[in-house]
Image: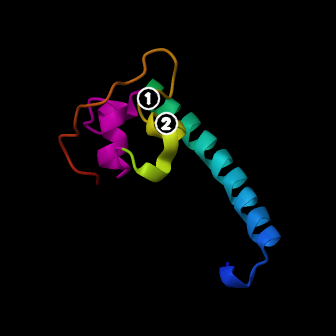
Amino acid sequence: MNLSLSSLSDDELHAAVRRLTARSNVTLADLLAHLGEVEERGIHRARACATLYAYCQYELRMSESRPTDGPRRRGSCTSTRSSGASSPGGSCTSPAS
């Protein structure tokens, strides 16, 4: 966005934040669906990661959690599927190629 944020009115800024949040929610849902498929196929193990959690940290360079993540995102790498979800821990034995 080339527009200076300080030049937006309060209503315009509020509307922009709502649009960005909606887009972020769609992207997060898509990411979680993809991570679920990675887990189901065992791709994380093929990449030398014992758990999906480790895959997220070492292969995708996701942080464990940040204050800005909120409760919704903190568990995204540990519970992408209701059955057989990975638990925190584990590591990858080789760096990403």
Residue drawn at x 75%, y 64% is 14
Q: Nearer the viewer, residue 4 or 48?
A: 4
Q: Is residue 85 left or right of residue 92?
A: right
Residue drawn at x 62%, y 42% is 30
- Answer whether residue 27 is visible to the viewer in this image: yes
Q: Is residue 39 left or right of residue 46?
A: right
Give the image location of residue 63, x and y in percent.
Answer: 35, 49
Q: Nearer the viewer, residue 37 or 32?
A: 32
Residue drawn at x 52%, y 18% is 82
Instruction: For mark 1, give the secondary structure.
Output: helix
Query: Which residue of the protein is positioned furthest toward the top in this rendering?
Result: 83
**Which mark, residue 59?**
none
Q: Amino acid at mark 1?
A: Glu
Q: Amino acid at mark 2?
A: Leu
* Residue on which disc 1 sits: 39
Residue drawn at x 55%, y 43% is 31
**Segment colored magenta:** 41-64
Say if the magenta span includes residue 52.
Answer: yes
Say if the magenta span includes residue 90.
Answer: no
**Which mark, residue 35?**
2
Position of 92 relative to 5 (above/below): above
Give the image location of residue 5, x and y in percent.
Answer: 67, 79
Q: Quadrant of the C terminus?
A: bottom left
Instruction: For mark 2, give the secondary structure.
Output: helix
Q: Is residue 90 left or right of residue 15?
A: left
Give the image location of residue 72, x and y in percent.
Answer: 54, 37
Name which quarter of the figure residue 1 lies in.
bottom right
- Answer whether residue 3 is visible to the viewer in this image: no
The reply to whether dot 2 and dot 1 touch (C-beta < 8 Å) is yes
Position of 92 relative to 51 (above/below): below
